[in-house]
């Protein structure tokens, strides 16, 4: 049983850049293609096949970005479980990797929430859940033509359910930010922090 006055500092969560150079253009084109397919924008003489190809390219770009975020989150959760294994007071507490993903998404420490919002990431709970859902299924992200078109089109719904399924596979102890705290960094920011520490040492 973890008491309210017990506190631990977890490894930092480091997020790497996940946008490919042509990503913004693909996402914008995909959104326009989706609206054209729904009849909400004029088709501009594009065929249905061309619009669907553009839509799927954007969707796969979104999948790719989420996939790599999921790798960062899963890596962090494993690092946190290694801390548990080294800590006598936590070893028999029922804490699993799912405990830390639950902490990140459901009981986000205030400083982490504020930093993500400063970055302009307001829907991070949904983004992180979907990223972890995809990571629960794919070790390597398949090419677009290896995925069923309906999965690509509605991947967000599949990812929501995959995350929920992954979290429910095994019982785990939920954690609260009053007991567990951690820092959030971009990879560039963390590299600068390490560099400044090395310069002082």
Image (cartoon, rainbow, N blue to C red):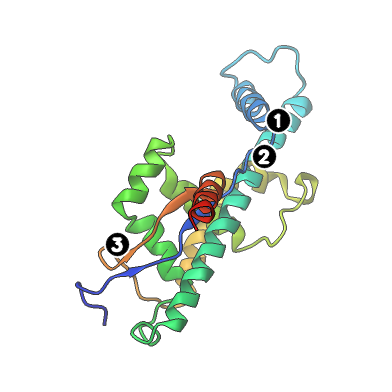
Q: Is mark 1 on a helix, strand or loop?
A: loop
Q: In which quarter of the image is the N terminus?
A: bottom left
Residue occupying the point 72% across, 49% down: 148
**Tag 1 near tag 2, CB within 8 Å:** yes
Whether residue 14 appears in this view of the structure is: yes
Q: Position of 105 compared to 129: left or right?
A: left
In the rendered structure, which disc, 2 or 3, sits on the residue that comes first in sequence?
A: 2
Q: Distance between the residues labelled 3 and 1?
A: 38 Å
Q: Mark 2 — residue?
A: 61
Other residues around mark 2 within 10 Å, as few (<14) / some (14–19) / many (≥20): many
- Tag 2 secondary structure: helix
Instruction: Tell me the tag on residue 22.
Output: 1
Q: Residues within 10 Å of mark 3 (few under 14, many from 20)?
A: some
- In this view, 133 is above or below 180: above
Q: Position of residue 124 (x, y in %)?
A: 43, 45
Q: Distance between the residues labelled 1 and 2?
A: 9 Å
| Residue 51 image-quadrant placement | top right
Find the distance from the CA under tag 2 to the CA under tag 3.
33 Å
Look at 64% across and 25% down and name the residue there.
37
Q: Look at 51% across and 69% down and name the residue there.
A: 79
Left or right of 22, for residue 65: left
**Rendered image quadrant of residue 27:** top right
Q: Residues within 10 Å of mark 1 (few under 14, many from 20)?
A: few
Secondary structure of the residue carrying numbered label 3: loop
Q: Earlier in the sequence, mark 3 or mark 1?
A: 1
Residue 118: where, in percent of width, then height?
38, 36
Q: List the residue tagged with mark 3.
A: 177
Pinpoint residue 9: horizontal percent, then vertical percent: 36, 66
Query: Is 89 above or below relative to 153?
Result: below
């Amino acid at each position: 049983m973890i008491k309210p006055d017990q506190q631990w500092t977890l490894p930092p969560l480091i997020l790497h850049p996940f946008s490919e150079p042509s990503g913004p253009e693909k996402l914008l084109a995909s959104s326009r293609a989706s609206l054209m397919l729904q009849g909400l924008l004029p088709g501009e003489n594009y065929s249905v096949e061309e619009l669907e190809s553009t839509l799927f390219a954007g969707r796969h770009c979104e999948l790719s970005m989420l996939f790599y975020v999921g790798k960062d989150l899963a890596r962090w959760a494993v690092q946190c479980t290694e801390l548990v294994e080294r800590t006598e007071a936590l070893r028999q507490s029922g804490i699993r990797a799912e405990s830390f993903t639950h902490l990140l998404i459901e009981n986000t420490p205030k400083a982490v929430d504020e930093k993500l919002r400063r970055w302009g990431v307001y829907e991070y709970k949904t983004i992180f859940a979907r990223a972890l859902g995809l990571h629960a299924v794919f070790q390597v992200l398949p090419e677009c033509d290896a995925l069923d078109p309906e999965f690509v089109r509605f991947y967000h719904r599949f990812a929501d359910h995959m995350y929920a399924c992954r979290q429910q596979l095994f019982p785990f102890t939920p954690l609260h930010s009053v007991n567990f705290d951690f820092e959030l960094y971009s990879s560039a920011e963390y590299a600068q922090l390490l560099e400044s520490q090395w310069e002082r040492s």
